[in-house]
Amino acid sequence: MGKVNVAVVGATGAVGREMVKILEERSFPINDLILLASTKSIGESIFLKKKEYKIQELDENSFDNIDIALFSAGSKVSKKFAPIATKKGVIVIDNSSAFRMDSKVPLIVPEVNYQDIKKHNGIIANPNCSTIQMVVALKPIFDEVGINRIIVSTYQSVSGTGKEAIDELSLQSHQVLNNEKLTRKVYPHQIAFNILPHIDVFEDNGYTKEEMKLVHETNKIFGNSKIKITATAARVPVFHGHSESVYIETKKHISINKLKKIYLKTKGIKLVDDIDNSKYPLAIMSEIYDEIMIGRLRKDLFEPNGISMWIVANNLRKGAALNAVQIAEFLI
Ligand code: NAP
Ligand code: 3JM
């Protein structure tokens, strides 16, 4: 492929806007760019390289002459429109959970399993933001010594829920600080000055769907591995950047020093681990760095093959839009 015709579905959303920005930042070879959203956004424009792009309403004819479509408008939209697009020969890179566990759909994080991209049948799935940052951090360990067990707790920012949730945290923070009556639309409880151990819907096993995404997606990305994974996903009153506390048990022993050396030379990872100077990854650093940031690396006190770490990444960029654009770059 030379220059390509690209459609962004959900271009007015938190992820979609980031996609458009990243296409520009990385000089993606675009011939024609179509920005699609719902009827609500008709009349809006987005500027790219100082050129105005009018938002168009998504419909069955949106994909005529398109080569690659980046979807981030939720799974309902993906389930309806991705098959319409692929029938027209479009390659869809989908950010929703709609097709991630479909055995015919590769689930890709380029740093981990780019070689699976070529197995696609028209749709390539982008993993959940929490999965992406965890598998990038664990890939070097998985390759070096193998992993038996992962226990992960996430501290996810509100931008992962979308633009309405960003507004909700902002408004509620103002309301709490000014002793005003609280308004609530997006989350089941107040999110300002609070933590919610509840992301996405609860499943019959007591875990949330977000927690089960970490279990199933991680094993699929690591080649249908059988890692025993336990996840707890929490929403925290942070605007940008997801943080994760991750404990792993490896198959073979690896020292923290060796692991640090490996991380220092791994592309896409930034080691921020200098406790003597209070240096460790912070959510706010994800607004500066695109790398997956890793710190607080330490050995378990009781289990010789146990390692704990703290992982932070930008959920809208590497956790969603940047990963999708990187997949598109592999395609072309
Ligand atoms: P958002 O800020 O709420 O934006 C939603 C976008 O979808 C908007 O552009 C919206 O258009 C559009 N949309 C909604 N319903 C539509 C319809 N019926 N037809 C056409 N467009 C429609 O949400 P977001 O945070 O950007 O997330 C969007 C989706 O991306 C999520 O639902 C999720 O599936 C996926 N996502 C994935 C990750 C990941 O981990 N990889 C992370 C975050 C999100 P209007 O502005 O016109 O309403
Ligand atoms: C991140 O369609 C929806 O309900 C979207 C829910 C959603 C998802 C999802 O399940 O696709 C919101 C935010 C994700 C995700 O990446 O899994």
Image (cartoon, rainbow, N blue to C red):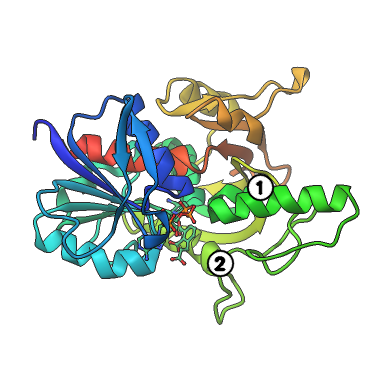
Sequence-first tag of 1 and 2: 2
In the rendered image, residue 25, in percent from the top left (x then y), is placed at 36, 25
Q: Residue at x 69, y 42 (%)?
A: 300
Some atom of ligand 2 lies within 8 Å of the CB belonging to the residue at label 2: yes
Q: Which residue is mark 2?
A: 200
Q: In this view, which residue lies farthest toward the bottom?
A: 204
Q: Is residue 65 left or right of residue 238?
A: left
Q: Residue at x 37, y 61 (%)?
A: 39
Give the SS element for disc 2: loop
Residue 153 visible in rendering: no
What amino acid is at disc 2?
Asp
Mark 1 or 2: the one toward you: 2
* Above or below for 143 versus 71: above
| Quadrant of the image containing the N terminus | top left
What amino acid is at disc 1?
Glu
Estimate how packed mark 1 is, as few (under 14), some (14 to 19) or many (20 or more) residues with alpha carbons within 10 Å. few
Residue 271 visible in rendering: yes
In the rendered image, residue 154, in percent from the top left (x then y), is placed at 62, 51
Q: Which residue is mark 1?
A: 303
Q: Is residue 40 left or right of residue 116?
A: right
Determine contact: label 1, label 2, CB under 8 Å.
Answer: no
Estimate how packed mark 2 is, as few (under 14), some (14 to 19) or many (20 or more) residues with alpha carbons within 10 Å. few
Q: In this view, which residue lies farthest toward the top?
A: 277
